[in-house]
Image (cartoon, grey):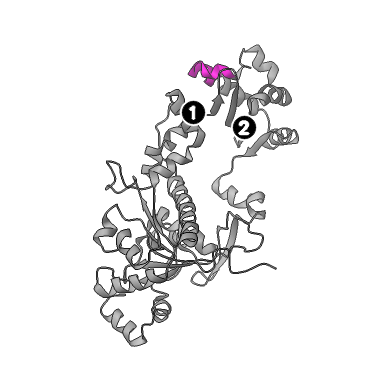
Amino acid sequence: MTDTKGPLSGIKAVTCSTAQAGTVPYMLMADMGAEIIKIELPKKGDGSRRAGEVKNGVSSFFETNNRGVKSLTLNLKSKEGKEILHKLIKRADIFGQNFSPGAAERNGFGYEELKKINPAIVYASVSAYGPDGPSANLPGTDAVGQAIGGVTEAFGVPGQQRRTGVASVADETCGLITLSGVLAALIHAKNTGRGQKVETSLIGSAFRLMGWTMTTSMWRNIPPITGARINGSRERAGIAACFNDIEGKPLAIQLEPDHWRPTLELLGFLDNLEKKGLDDLGLAFESEENKNLILEELNKMFATNKREHWIKILRDERRIAAPVNSMIEASNDPDIVENNYVTEVFHPDLGEKFKTHGTPWKFSETPSKIGIAPKLAEHNNEILLDLGYSIDEIKDFENKEII
């Protein structure tokens, strides 16, 4: 029998987080059953409530990054607001914020202050540049993470101006890394009674995202081959690349060194490449010209038939091949749909269901539950009554704009 409460049921987090990297960890925790209390500015709320596509007051950006959490408005510059926050911290397992380094301390909710209230608190701090570097106090966004972390070069196209991608890969990666760090610290706190501060950043997360490709570049101290991922060595080269079919539809392939020549033969490409002296993929390590000649010839050959044709040939022999989806195609891809990586949620303010991310995890006993984002101050009464405040006190807080 499954437990519908979720694997993080019983865990409570309080967050003063905005933006994507600061909210995604707690949205994912809410999916998994944690109680997340999001602190927002009275009357104004999180500025991202107005970001993305907005329909009937519902923001695609805010909905994606804050679903399933509770909204409590709180003026943290007021004495009463800080007292309310401190009462929440006493009961919480986790506190999260993504202010610039030092800002939380100046506003009275730095780690040293909050751990006096709750020594077991796991305190998550997300920044753009990390806490210690020369740019620590500067603001930053996803573009900073992509640019500094090496992502922009990795996805660059030779001869074209480099640009950061439309997908917020630094933000999302930072969200996932923050989530994993918080959960690790939470296990430690549950085992020892001692909390700790967990610090993550956009540039650190993007740099980690580069994985072994970054390690290889550091070992060689030369830029990677771009335009396609040709890796390994001159003697043993593999490839991951995209090619257009006869209709201009792209497909992706990835071949390990041992599969290069057998796959060329399988596709009927080997004789042509041998005649032109381009059957040795290692030539790409010798010059940009060689790399481009190999890729251009592959492009020509893949453009002689439909991608379904090529993908079937490759997959029948257990080779790696897939269509390159547009974002709309991805949301309708059968493997995405069947695994519930995309789902539909009814929203009362829209009066209809909308498509959104499902969950990337599949728990056999404690399935995730997808909620919707809260209205501003929706949970003020619920949270404050639970803390022991009376209705009259709550009304007074409202009149004084403390909440």
Residue at (42%, 30%) from the top-left corner? 160
Amino acid type shown at disc 2:
Gln
- Which class describes the residues within 10 Å of circle 1: few (<14), some (14-19), or many (20+)? some
- Which quadrant would residue 236 be assigned to in this image? top right
Is residue 122 among the parts visible in the rendering? Answer: yes
- Which quadrant would residue 312 be assigned to in this image? top right
Q: Is residue 128 above or below residue 73?
A: above
Residue at (49%, 54%) from the top-left corner? 184
For the C terminus, the quadrant is: bottom left
Where residue 66 sits in the image (x, y, percent)?
45, 62
Q: Is residue 254 above or below residue 46?
A: above
- Which quadrant would residue 116 be assigned to in this image? bottom left
| Dot 1: element | helix
Amino acid type shown at disc 1:
Thr
Judged from this view, the residue extending furthest toward the bottom is: 392
Where residue 25 sits in the image (x, y, percent)?
46, 57
Residue that label 1 marks: 216
Q: Is residue 195 above or below residue 154?
A: below
The magenta stretch is 282-293
Mark pair 2, 1: CA separation: 18 Å
Q: Is residue 111 above or below residue 202?
A: below
Where residue 180 sits in the image (x, y, percent)?
49, 52
Where residue 234 sits in the image (x, y, percent)?
56, 18
* Residue 159: in magenta span: no
* SS majority, magenta: helix
Judged from this view, the residue extending furthest toward the right is: 316
For marks 2 and 1 on the same chain, the one whose residue lies earlier in the sequence: 1
| Dot 2: element | strand
Q: Is residue 92 found left or right of 139 in the rendered image? A: right
Residue that label 2 marks: 254
Front position in the image: 344 or 2 = 2
